[in-house]
Amino acid sequence: MHIDYLCDHPELIEELATLNFDEWGKYRPEDTLEARTQRMRAACGRGAIPSVVVALEGSRLLGGALLIENDLKLRPNLTPWLAGVYVKAEERGRGVASQLVNRVVAEAAALGVKELYLYTDAAQSLYARLGWEVIEEMVYEELPVTVMKYTIKH
């Protein structure tokens, strides 16, 4: 398994966008798969904000994660964000999510970022194990979420 930029594998943009839409689209009824795919394509930077990284085994997509400017409309002052961390169900339990998260942290560190944020509804323990700290509990788009922060040491 290795982590790479999604922009180097454009044939996987639609698949990753579909996985993200299937997982989180229900929380944004106004969203469409086409719109999500366009946003995914637009986020495909390299060594920049935004960027998308993917976990691959050969040419097979295992999952992905994004580094974006903002992921929580209610907290526009918090930036940048780790977002869209997703690993296919059959690939979970292998450390793929941890590697994706660590790669996004490394990408942010290389850009001089001091603090990185995320919100999650279910994976708080994963992020806590990786050094993220809870900064707020809230309801966002009718879903109870935990906002977390990672302080990057330079």
Image: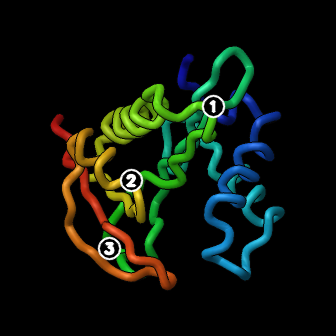
Between tags 2 and 3, which lies in front? 2
- Give the mark nearest the N terminus, 2 or 3: 3
Label 2, secondary structure: give it: loop
Amino acid carrying label 2: it is: Ala
Callout 1: helix, strand or loop? Answer: strand
Labels 1 and 3: the sequence-earlier one: 1
Q: Nearer the viewer, mark 1 or mark 3?
A: 1
Q: Which amino acid, mark 3? A: Asn
Q: Using residue 128 as the reference point, say whether residue 61 is left or right of it.
A: right
Give the quadrant of residue 119: bottom left
Q: Are marks 2 and 3 in contact (CB under 8 Å)?
A: no
Say how the picture is coloured. Answer: rainbow
Between the C-alphas of marks 2 and 3, the distance is: 23 Å
Residue located at (71% from left, 59% from top): 22
Residue 68 is situated, as x and y percent measured from the top left of the image, at 49, 55
Sequence-wise first label, 1 or 2: 1
Q: Position of residue 128 (x, y in %)?
A: 24, 47
Residue 154 percent location from the top left of the image? 17, 35
Q: Is residue 152 above or below residue 143?
A: above
In the displayed structure image, the side of residue 50 where residue 119 appears, left or right:
left
User: Local crowd at mark 1 within 10 Å, few (<14), some, or many (≥20)?
Assistant: many
User: What distance separates the C-alpha of mark 1 from that of mark 2?
Assistant: 18 Å
Taking the spot 54% from the left edge, 25% from the top edge, the residue there is 3
**Rendered residue at 32%/67% (across/down):** 146
The residue that label 1 is drawn on is 62
Mark 3: few/some/many CA within 10 Å (<14, 14-19, 20+): few
Label at residue 77: 3
- Amino acid carrying label 1: it is Leu
